[in-house]
Each structure stands twice: as C-alpha cells, then as structure tokens.
Amino acid sequence: MDYSQASDELLISLIAQGKTEAISVLYDRYARLVFSLALAILRDRMLAEEVTQDTFLNAWRGAAGFHIEQGRVSTWLSAIARHRAIDELRRRHLPALNIDEPWWETRASNSPLKGGEDDLMLMQVSNALADLPKEQKQAIYLAYFGGLTQEEIAQKLGEPLGTVKTRIRLGLKKVRDAVLKE
Amino acid sequence: MAKPESKMTHEEIKELLPGYALGALHAEEAEILVRHLPTCDSCPRELAQYRQALDALPRLVPEATPQAQVKQRLMERLAPPEKRRLSWSRFALAWTPLSLLFLAGLLAVTFGLSNQLQATQDWPVVAVRLEATETAPQAVGFVLFLPRQEMAMLAVRDMPSLPSGREYQLWLTRDSEKESGGTFTVDSEGRGYLVVAMEDFLLYQGIGITMEPAGGSLVPTGDRYMFGSI
C-alpha cells in the first residue's frame, strides 16, 4: 500500500487504525521539521533525536484523538515536539537560550514542504516574524524556543515586565496582521 | 501583579491573547483567559489567528536531519495497538534514577514504606507520561500503575492554581466512556497527587485531567489540563 501521496489527515486516520506504513510516511514527511525545532530548543543532537522519536510515538498513540478542527497535522506535531523539548530543557537544567542566536536573522528561504498556497502564506508569515524589530523578535523567540514566561524573560533581559509584555503583544500583532492580509 | 478579573476590561483581557498563544503567561493570567474564552465571540477567533502566526516559527530554525537510526528505533517500538503486549522490563528501564527517587519519596511519604524501593520483577510499574496543554503549558505529570498492588498513582507539578470552589479531576477513558479516578487539589507550587484503587489498568486507553467544581462532576465539563495514553 503506497501512502506517500496521502494527505496528512488521511495518514492520521490510517495511523489511528494501526497502519505502521502510515506513520512511516508521516515520519518521512515531518521528521526534519520536528528534529530541527527540537534541536533549536535543546541545542543537543542526541536529546533532539529522543524528542523526535517521542513526538512520533505520541502521534502514533494519540492519532485517534486528533481532530481536523485542531488545525494542521504539522502544527500538532510541532506543538508536541516543542512541549517535549521545553520539558526536557527544564528537567535537565540545560543552558538557557542565548538572548541572541545567529539564526534569528534568517528569513525563510525554502519551505521544507513542497510548494503550495498554504506554504506561500507560511513563508510570508515567517518573513514577517524574521523582519520584526529586534526587541520584539527576541521576546517572542525567548518565549517560544526558550519556553520562558514573560516574567522570566524580563528577568533575563533586565527589563521591566510591562516592557516585555508590550513587545510580545506588538510583535505578535504585526505578524497576525500579515496572516490576516492573506 | 495582575488585576482581579472582575476589574479587567475586555480590551485588557484581549491583550493577554498573544502571551497566551505563546504559552508565556503566568498561571493566573492564563486562567483568566481559560475562563473568558468560552464566553466570548471574538477572542477565540483572535487567538486562532495568533496561533496561526506562531505556526510559522518552526519553519525559521536552521534545517537539520536526524540520523537514520531514529526512524529505525521508532519503527521497532511500534506495535499495532490491538496486538500491543506489555513488557515490564522495558518500562522498568525507562526509569531514570531521579524518577525512582521521586517515586520512592512519594510512596514513602504516603504509605510509610521503606525508602529502599526499586522497580523489580516482583513490583512491576507501568509509567505513563502526561502531556501538557495550552491551559497548563508548564505542567508536568505522570501516572504510575502498580498492577500487583491494584492501584495507580498520579503526580503532577506546575499545574495552574485552583480558583476557590474548584478541584482537578482525573478521568480514565474506557472505550468511549470516561470514568472518574477522583479529585485532587494542588499546592502553591502546583503540585498534587492522587491515589486510585484500580483492579485492571489495561481496561483503560487514556487519561485526562480537567478542572471541575469541588467534589467533582459525573462527566468532564471543564477544560482539559493534561492528558496521556496508556
């Protein structure tokens, strides 16, 4: 049975039925996305690989509970991976994210997924994020990739809490506007 | 400090949405939204837009590829759900020394047992990690099933603090029914635990924790805070 052309949603329902070939295809499709995210958070290949494995195991076990209304399958996988990676970051007391990583300057060049309308929008939103004023991007990235709360970010940067909250709010509003424009 | 919810304007509540989408809010602030969202027409839509915006973040990291062995190990660990057999040794090996210490401490405190506790073949332990959700983004928890002792133990930390008159309730999914495992509260650090008498944990497929009125509900009514699969 060749599932390589199956949609993400079809793959999930096949996985819920216990079809290992379907999880294999899902892995091939999204392992790099999941691993790259885990690596950006943990900065340790071995741990990132563990998180990758756990993410797909979770997908395997939880497929029956996934509903289309929850959004994209890729978003679901990224969310599982992010939670798991941040959890690991905290439990192992790994070094916190730097306040400025070199890759924060990059804009989305190639989407890891094949081209399509969805991915064009994703790329435009990615660029809106990458183009944010430095302080806003920093606050959002520390929250997302570092798993820090607003209070923790304020402490880390030596800034007032209100300032951090405003930066996050304004930054995300700008990106949201880019989403709405589509 | 956050204003009490009753004194917040809708505009002020809306300003919490971006932080909430990021999971960066303080527990009390997150709870304000958890309570507000079901009652509002515009906020859930706005929240979905912020989440869509954040969806793009994973696309911005440097692209990296995991080794081939990761997939190999994953496929080895899969077994069709119907034919799934449990191997005690696999779960016993999954414990890190720190987890064993925590388990030992918890049981010792609860039951006055010796601290010299080890997961041996005489005392099989099946552990299920609980997953955090957006309502409890920092929460960590697990459930231990001790089949020989016909009991299960839930332990959580960093759960949002409970408003007065509310408790967390543990649910066990059996086919499509949800059975209550009981209710529990958490301390100021968001820590809580619950002990459940259980004859056969293999009857259940899933675990969930919701917030309910004190004393519990007959069926889940509140938001889901944590979940896991058996």
Image: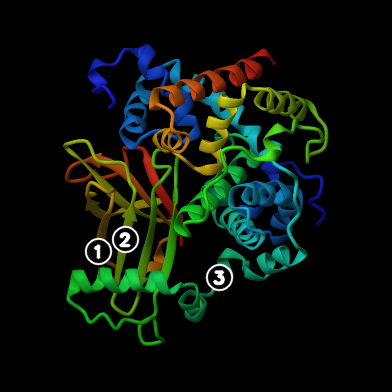
What label does residue B195 carry, if any? 1
Quick one: quadrant of the N terminus of chain A?
bottom right
Q: Is residue B229 in view? A: yes
Pick whichever of labels 2 and 3 is earlier in the sequence: 3
Look at label 2 and name its amino acid: Leu
For the image shown, how many numbered marks are present on the structure? 3
Pick whichever of labels 1 and 2 is earlier in the sequence: 2
Front position in the image: B79 or A27:
A27
The alpha-carbon separation of the residues under discs 1 and 2 comes to: 6 Å
Q: Quadrant of residue B150?
A: bottom left
Look at label 1 and name its amino acid: Val
Front position in the image: B150 or B101:
B101
Label 2 packing within 10 angstroms: few (<14), some (14-19), many (20+): many
Whether residue B14 sits left or right of residue B189 in the image: it is: right
Q: Residue B95: x percent and y percent?
A: 45, 73
Q: Residue at left 77%, top 64%?
A: B68
Do callouts 1 and 2 mark residues in contact (Cβ within 8 Å)?
A: yes
The alpha-carbon separation of the residues under discs 3 and 1 comes to: 26 Å
In the orientation shown, which residue stands out farthest toward the bottom? B122
Q: Residue at left 32%, top 80%?
A: B148
Whether residue B213 sits left or right of residue B73 in the image: it is: left
Q: Which residue is mark 3?
A: B84
Look at label 3 and name its amino acid: Arg
Pick whichever of labels 3 and 1 is earlier in the sequence: 3
**Position of A154 relative to A45 (above/below):** above
Of helix, strand and loop, which one carries label 3?
loop
Q: Nearer the viewer, mark 2 or mark 3?
A: 2
**Position of A92 relative to A181 (above/below):** below
